[in-house]
Amino acid sequence: MISSLLRHISKLCLIVIFLTSCDRDSSDHNGIFTKRPPNSKELKAEVQYLALIKKLTKSEITFIETQLDKVQDTLGVPKALLWCVLFQESRFDPFMNAFTDAPAKGIGQFTGSALDEINFDTDIYDSRTSAILQAQLKPKNLPLDFTIKTSPLNRMPGSIEKRLPPQPLTSYFRASTAIFASGAYLNNRYQQLKSALDHQGISYDPQILWLYAAAAYNKGSRTVFLLLTHEYMSHGEGALRDLLSDPKAAYSLLTHQKRLDLTLKEIWTKKTRTKYIDELLRNMEVISSCSLSST
Amino acid sequence: MNKITQTFKKLLRGDRIFILIFILFDLFLIIVARRYFQSLVDLTSQTTIKNPTEQERQAIQELETLATTRSWKTLEDARFEQASHYLQLNLKPSPGNALYFYPETLPDKSLEKEFAYGQLKPGIEGLRKAYQNKKEQEASQAYRKLKSRVENYELGISANPDDLSDEAKRFLKLYEEFTKLSP
């Protein structure tokens, strides 16, 4: 009787091991990111609405997704994540703020500082960046700028011609250039976080680290470092490991108003901090629900 | 010697050996726990929210005044002396000042150390070289690079320089002096 019981238990164990390894295999294959962004109903509806009012055509989305595939293949930036980051930043409008005084412009909402990083610190975080950008910009090369080309029709008052001509290769307002530059910037944040964690011998799931990189894209790596350090000090190494290996724990941290506020008191006064945290919360909620296969 | 050996042999007899093992194990636990909590204390003292003290503010002000003389050596000597003061007295400046002005005082486990030594220090070094070679355009370029590193680190893509931390602003203002080569 005991031997038959043991046989049943061992069979059960084998089944459990099989099922969990299948689960691991499929999750390894898909990762934590969805294959078809956006993963949220609200954003899907918004994409359809933008198509309906002709602000974003299907061919434009296809073109953007082709570029995102290339960025993923060359720099390893998860396509779904960059898709969601860019959609959140600009709703895929390559000319966002092109004609205003707002400092953040284009599809990835680059500022002058971000452009400076791509232009002057190209390989500081990843030695592949300049070669990849060079291949993308051929026959031109860095630096990138905010040059915008208009046609005489665009400049006529009351002109119905809204569509701008194709932009120069080195212009951030050229969609393909901007997607690669934004991908490189996101990759820089990832590499910056990775380097610091590797240096300290702290283990992490690379896919989860990309989530933190998305937060750092929008609000700087310093926020992420301070958050992780604060959690480590308050709740120990086990909690830090969870934050760097469990997407739910990472999402919870990056969207927790009180925890963000407590940590960021170190850097900013209340007014700046409140604005900053509101933006970060909004962005991370949207980006996570858009890019993660489950939250 | 015989007495010592005999005493030792008596100790190892019977249940006394278990008491010895128990004592040794306790000592081992104390040593391990002490090391573990010491490392936590080191980090805690750094990462507990700590605003700059008045003395710290005055020390940074001193550096800012020295920067206007545009003597790199004088500035660096003063900065190093201030950092050594903190280290000798085992004091910790506020985290922002530690990052930008006294990276030597950052704890070993600080995640910000990589930025301080990997991006800030080489950026300052680039500025120093351009300044000392009296190349104004290169100095401006080096400063621009340093500024971009700080802004991207603190603010990400939304880099509105007005939102930089006070320490970052003071750091950039200090080193901006070295882009002015003409008297």
Image (spheres, rainbow, N blue to C red):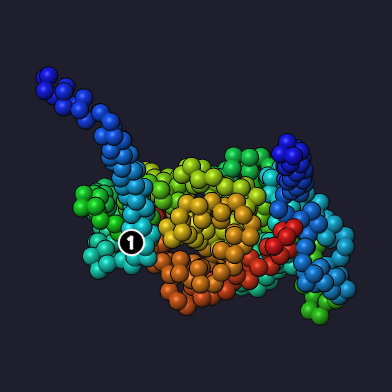
Q: Residue furthest bottom?
A: A158
| Residue B153 pos. (x, y %) | 50, 57
Q: Quadrant of the C terminus of chain B?
A: bottom left
| Residue A21 pos. (x, y %) | 74, 42
Asked which quadrant contains residue A173, the reply is bottom right
Asked which quadrant contains residue A108, the reply is bottom right
Could one spot residue A143 in this view of the protein? no
Along the line of sight, the residue nearer the viewer: A149 or B57: B57
| Residue A256 pos. (x, y %) | 56, 69
| Amino acid type assigned to the residue bearing label 1 in the image | Ser
| Residue A37 pos. (x, y %) | 78, 59
Q: Residue furthest top?
A: B2
Left or right, A193 with reference to A32: left
Could one spot residue B160 in this view of the protein? yes
Residue lying at 83% horizontally and 77% vertically, measured from the top left: A159
Residue lying at 34% horizontally and 65% vertically, measured from the top left: B50
Along the line of sight, the residue nearer the viewer: A15 or B124: A15
Along the line of sight, the residue nearer the viewer: A241 or A167: A241
Q: Quadrant of the N terminus of chain B?
A: top left
The crowding category of the residue bearing disc 1, from other C-alpha atoms within 10 Å (few below 14, some 14 to 19, many at least 20), is many
Along the line of sight, the residue nearer the viewer: B45 or B87: B45
Which residue is under mark 1? B94
Left or right, B98 with reference to B152: left
